[in-house]
Structure formats: C-alpha cells, structure tokens
Amino acid sequence: VDRNRGETEFHQAVREVLESLGPVLAKHPEYADHKIIERICEPERQIVFRVPWEDDRGEVQINRGFRIEFNSALGPYKGGLRFHPSVYQGIVKFLGFEQVFKNALTGLPIGGGKGGADFDPKGRSEREVMRFCQSYMTELHRHIGEYTDVPAGDAGVGGREVGYLFGQYKRICNRYESGVLTGKELAYGGARVRTEATGYGCAFFVHEMLAARGESFEGKRVVVSGSGNVAIYTMEKVHQFGGTVVACSDSDGYLYDEQGIDVELVKQLKEVERERISAYAQRSGGRFLPGRRVWEVPCEVAMPSATQNEINGTDAAMLVRNGCVAVGEGANMPCTPEAVRDFQEAGVAFGPGKAANAGGVATSALEMQQNASRDSWSFEFSENRLEEIMKDVHARCHDTAAEYGMPGNYVAGANIAGFTRVADAMLGLGLI
Ligand code: NDP
C-alpha cells in the first residue's frame, strides 16, 4: 500500500482480485512459493511523460501522459488509452491491472497494459484534438510496437483519435505497422465489429448469464448508463435480443424513453454531430432529466457503461428493490465493492467488467490477427467470432466458480480463471 500511496482505485481493483484468490493459493502453493501475487501486482514498466501542445488561441498547454505496461507473460501489452481530466497514475494502474486478467480470460495471446492522459477533449476543436494526439504520440512511439505494446481506444479515444495517433506513429517511424494500434478505421487497417465489440460483447455475456437461469432479454426493461461507444452498442444489441432500453445517460443527467431509446438517433447525435443526449428530446419522444441518476429508473437489467464507481450501495439497493435481476458491467469497475456485495447477496446475476466487457479487447486481438495476415474479415464472420469468444468467457467464469465451490459467482470465476492463466505462464517463464 505504501508504495502506491493515494492510488485508491488501484487499491480497490487489487483488493477485489486478491479477495477471490484464497482457495487458489491453498490448491496451488507453488504460486506463493514463487511470489506470483507480489510480482503480478507490480507493473513491469510505468511511463509518465509531458505532453505539450498549442491550443487554437496559440496558447501553450501542458498535459501529463501515461502508459502502464503491466504484464506481458501472455503476449504484447494490450489495452486502451483514456483521455479524461480525471486520469492519474491510480486510474491507469487500476485499468492496467484489470486488463491483465480480462485479456487472459479471452484465451487470446495478449498481455495487459493501459494508458492515457489528463486531457479533456470536451469542447476542443478537431485541430486541437489532432495536435494533442500528435504530441502524445511523439513520446509514446518509442515505447510501443506490434510485438511490444499495442494501445487502443478507451473513454475519450475513439476512431478519430486512433487515426491521428496512428498517422503520427507512421510519420515518425516511417513504417506502416498496422498492428501497432487497434480500433483503427476500416480505411487504414481497422477491423469490422471493433466499434461495436465491447457493447455487443457485454450484451452477449448478459444473454448467457440470463440463459444459465432459464431467462432471456425478451420483454425486459434495461437501463444503460453513459452514451458513448460502449453504451451505444450495448443498446443496439439489447434491442436485437428483444429487450427494451428505457434509459441512458451522460454526466449531465439521463434520458428516459419508455418506448425504447432510438439508438439510431443517439448515434447521429453522438457519433456524427458530436452533440449531447439532451438534444434527443427536441427531436423525438423521451425526456431528459438533468442532474438525476439513471439508477432510479425501474428495470430488470442494468448495464453500467460509463465510468468507475458509478453504482454505489444506495444505487444497488434501489435497483434490487425495483426488481433488477441481472447486471452486466460494460464499463471498468462501475460498481463499488458495497454494490457488488449487495447484488450478490440479493441473488442478482452479476457479470464483472473483466469478463462482461472483454469483447472489445478480444476483437482488438482479432484486428491484430487480420493485420498480421493482411486480411479483412466480413462483419458476419467477425461478429460470430466475438459471440463465440464471449460464450467461452462466460463458460470459463461459470465453470471455474462451480469448480471452486462458488456456483453463480462470476466475480470469483473471472478472477480465478484469469489469474491462473497468467500465473502459470509466469511460472513457466522463470523469474521475470
Ligand atoms: P466514451 O468516452 O465513448 O463514453 C463515456 C460515456 O460515459 C459518455 O457518455 C460520458 O458522458 C459518460 N460518463 C462519463 N463519466 C460519467 C459520469 N460520472 N456519470 C455519467 N456518465 C458519465 O467511453 P467508452 O464508452 O469507450 O467507455 C466507457 C467505459 O467502458 C469506461 O469505463 C471504459 O474503460 C470501458 N471500456 C471501454 C471499452 C471500449 O472498447 N471502448 C472496452 C472495455 C471497457 P460525458 O460525455 O458527459 O462525459
């Protein structure tokens, strides 16, 4: 704890994993003998750097950039970049730590890492965003590569930003290394379904959890938080599964539409016009409720897809009281430890982020495969691969939880299955 002073989110993420590992260490004393826990909690490398850039008024701005290369036992570091004013070491480390186990759960050959900057893209012009991305990559390029570290997008970093980052990498390195970044646009080496992958994947995961209880999305009211990349494609797939998403949100409040959120309109507002969802009500039915929390909306399924710690114990209690039976974490660590406990005690099917939102990084690994073989798969083929992977992730969590005597506990299942895969690779690789 001393070594990571003040990094509260990192402490929270580590505690959550370690709490699950007692039975594993009892069964596998070799992990303790080789100090796997101590090693796995320490990032292999942490890079912190200055990002100077000039805004549209000609004023110099300074941000702080990060890349945490957490664990490469299974493959090159892999994980997104987040641009948000709240970004600091503790956030990037929690995200990187989670990423190690998430990536292991996919069964694909990828290590874990995460990065970002305390840059706020909100209200910035296209040219400012480009200048920032170029400056960020001017430092980052020396640390990444197809076989070393492969960043992608995360909150605040979408296809546009990945494009500017890739353009600058290509320019500095004089190398068309498609596999160095994922989440690229189709025109320059991107993969179909990557944009949709995290949201679709989360819906597939919840579909599997419901099916394991003999239920489905059919006829259920669903509440999704956020209105960014993960939220939009979660809503789209939930509607395809026959559920009705009645609310979504942003940091200003939430949008309620009893008829079901019109996802095409949200896409138009957010992806094309770069507008806020408060504009939805002027163009269609529905009401925008400023300053209110979306978890007050009654639903059977909740899919938090905005940010960390957005569902606390009070929110969880309200959701349970209102009849919520399943929760799928589209975001990373959106539920506080109290909320997770409340859901589990109430018998809610709870899918933790490192399992439920693994579809994004899994499809990134498929993008790397396509880049390596100079191939480009169809939408249908890619979506089928994603669905298969999410079914496998669900089965791995479900079966591991049962094997360790905690049936239905997807938190324990995900932590144990992810941990053992990384730990076994670390044992095999010697003292690294
Ligand atoms: P985006 O930046 O596209 O969207 C984030 C959304 O969350 C925005 O609508 C934002 O609203 C909203 N939001 C942020 N903070 C709050 C808040 N405090 N209260 C309410 N709404 C809030 O990010 P993504 O959709 O890419 O990522 C969302 C989450 O999913 C993150 O936790 C991310 O780590 C995780 N994730 C993303 C993956 C991906 O492939 N993109 C993969 C796996 C996980 P506003 O505009 O007002 O800030």
Image (cartoon, rainbow, N blue to C red):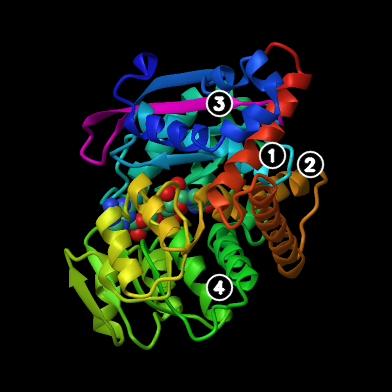
Q: Label 2, label 3: how many angstroms apart (C-alpha)?
A: 24 Å
**Tags 2 and 1 in contact by the CB under 8 Å rule?**
yes
Q: Earlier in the sequence, mark 3 or mark 1?
A: 3
Q: Residue at x 51, y 67 (%)?
A: 233
Q: CA distance from mark 2 to mark 1?
A: 7 Å
Q: Is residue 134 visible?
A: no
Q: Residues within 10 Å of mark 2 (few under 14, many from 20)?
A: few
- Whichever of callouts 4 and 1 sits on the residue coming sooner in the sequence is 1
Give the farthest residue toward the left. 291
Front position among marks 2 and 3 = 3
Instruction: Find disc 4 in the rendering and name its residue.
Output: 237
CB under 8 Å between callouts 4 and 3? no
Task: Find the distance from the CA under tag 4 to the CA under tag 2.
Answer: 29 Å
Q: Which mark is residue 372?
A: 2
Of tags 3 and 1, which is closer to the observer?
3
Residue 321 percent coordinates (x, y): 31, 71
Q: Is disc 4 in contact with disc 2, using a CB cutoff of under 8 Å?
A: no
Please give the range of residues in magenta. 53-74
Of discs 4 and 1, which sits in the foreground?
4
Please name the residue shown 35% across and 53% down the image.
339
Residue 333 position in % (x across, y down): 42, 46
The residue pinned by badge 3 equals 70
Let me know if residue 141 is in the magenta part: no
Dot 1 corresponds to which residue? Answer: 179
Amino acid type shown at disc 4: Lys
Q: Nearer the viewer, residue 239 or 217?
A: 217
Q: Label 1 amino acid? A: Gly
Is mark 4 in CB contact (under 8 Å) with mark 1? no
Q: Mark 2: which amino acid?
A: Ala
